[in-house]
Amino acid sequence: MNRLLAVFLLTFLIHLVDALSYAVRPAGVRTGRLATALSLFNVIALAARTANLIQAPLLGSLVDQAVLRGTSARLADDFRLVLAAATLGAVVGAGAVPTFVRVFSRAILAFERAGSVLGLLARALSPRALLSVSHDVRPPGLELGRRLDFRGVPYGFLVLNVAITAIYTTGVLSALYAGALVPDYRTTATQLSGVINGFATVLFVLAVDPVAALVTDQVLAGRRPRGQVNAVAALLSGTKVLGTLLAQLLFAPAADLVVAVTGWIVR
């Protein structure tokens, strides 16, 4: 149970940070320092990458225990709970995007004054800075809705974001569960998670991220209203939540597909 709780919390953190990443471009537009915003967020993203490194062996140990004890059915329930953690992280992150835009905008300007990440961290931990940040923490309200401009925002890439998020969210879990279903070929099955997530990453890089980047650049150039970059952030965070919910539906079919592909590979 402690191991499962750790995986739950790590998954929550990973998807929380992923959802907050949608606030980077609005903050960059707000401050006029998009390159700094993208670079500075990488410091925050280190938390998610570290969580991924810790999460991987813990997930593997859940599979090993299930195989040893013959409890693969229970493993499916555990993995669905992990998927629920992804949804919870996405929901909390989506709700926190407006606040994070304000806080991150402050951090960008503070970084410019501090001149280094360590200097920024020293300033951020001061009582005055923490008090200032607390004033920016507000739940989304009607004020947010007035700052969103959905006119002319392309929507096709949002459908893709739902599908890509679903594939990425369930990819590793489905492959690991497939390994538990065919324990004799567990290594082959789990290695297919790289293929699944690689496919989702390629789709994201080709079809989703460039569109969001284009809207951002057009806003910076004055060819679109600023509210559209906020609208794109809201829509991406919302479709991420939908994607994690779709992952629940894809979990079992994806595991069956991995089992079938594994059988074809090892023949």
Image (cartoon, rainbow, N blue to C red):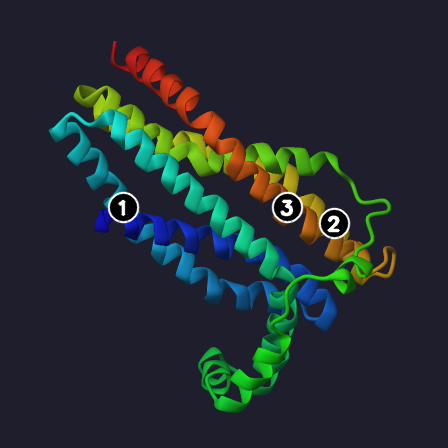
Q: Which residue is more in the foreground, 67 or 190?
A: 67
**Residue 198 place in picture, x, y as percent:** 45, 35
| Residue at 48% from the left image edge and 26% from the top image edge | 249
Front: mark 1 or 2? 1
Question: Pointer 2: what residue?
Answer: 214
Are circles 1 and 2 on residues that touch, CB within 8 Å? no
Say whether disc 2 or disc 3 marks the residue closer to the N-terminus: 2
Front: mark 2 or 3? 3
In space, the residues marked 2 and 3 are separated at their CA atoms by 19 Å
- Left/right placement of residue 247 relative to residue 136 reads left
Secondary element under disc 1, as helix, strand or loop, is helix
Q: Is residue 32 visible?
A: no
Question: Pointer 3: what residue?
Answer: 238
**Residue 206 place in picture, x, y as percent:** 62, 38
Question: Pointer 1: what residue?
Answer: 4
**Residue 33 place in picture, x, y as percent:** 68, 70
Are circles 2 and 3 on residues that touch, CB within 8 Å? no
